[in-house]
Amino acid sequence: MTEVSSLTGRLLVATPSLADPNFERAVVLLLEHDGEGALGVVLNRPTPVGVADVLESWAALTGTPDVVFQGGPVSLDAALGIAVVPGGAADGDVAAGPMGWRRIHGAIGLVDLDAPPELVAAELGTLRIFAGYAGWAPGQLEDELADGAWYVVESEPGDVSSPAPEGLWRAVLRRQRSRLAMFATYPDDAALN
């Protein structure tokens, strides 16, 4: 098996040609990527379900919109908390950050939703709750990348907590300093162009 270069902490941005309804215009934050496969959450799929309706103790720590996001099509009954911890950007310092928070990349990390919220509350900058996740078997993501289904770009802490998640696909593409930026203007339905 060939060695896989980890994309953990980076964003997968769906290309305009990706027609899978689970990932059309999706922006996925990769939480894990190695030879065993990949796991991430879709950052731009808010649901109508309020965080207070499912995880009341965490509701006061979530930003706007204060709803649960559909993180992907796998295990929709499982919840993941992704949070940004200001000053938690020292990638080499595993100890940096509050108890109950595990660094993924820079200031972005996973929150242990079984822990008492007060353990991390004082140090969290933003928190978002996701139902489900996106998963890839070994080699599957690499095949999709080779087929041109995804653009891979750097993540920024603000991607996790965008107050306008529906516009995140265009916003992430627009900030690229390459030809990718022009895809931000790609029409929702190219047939109507």
Image (spheres, rainbow, N blue to C red):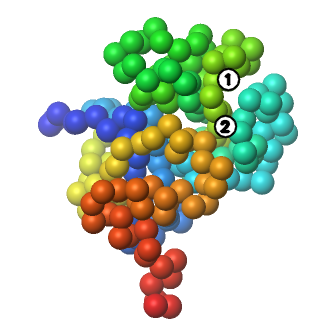
Picture coordinates of residue 5 (x, y %)? 22, 36
Residue 180 visible in the current orientation? yes
Q: Nearer the viewer, residue 141 or 57?
A: 57
- Residues at marks 1 and 2, CA–CA distance in whole angstroms: 9 Å
Residue drawn at (60%, 42%) of the image:
161
**Side (left or right) of 65 relative to 132:** right
Q: Quadrant of residue 62?
A: top right
Residue drawn at 79 percent across, 33 percent down: 59
Q: Are marks 1 and 2 in contact (CB under 8 Å)?
A: yes
Observer-nearest of 159 and 33: 159
Residue 143's x, y, as percent? 26, 53
In the rendered image, the vertical position of residue 42 relative to residue 32, given as above or below: below
Q: Position of residue 101 (x, y in %)?
A: 56, 18
- Amino acid on which the number 1 mark rests in the picture: Leu
**Image point (56%, 30%), residue name:** 84
- Amino acid type for the residue under numbered disc 2: Ile
- Kindly identify which residue carries mark 1: 113
N-terminal-most mark, 1 or 2: 1
**Quadrant in which residue 94 is drawn:** top left
Mark identifier at residue 129: 2
Query: For the N terminus, which image quadrant?
Result: top left
* Residue found at x 27% / y 44%: 139
Which residue lies most toward the bottom here?
192
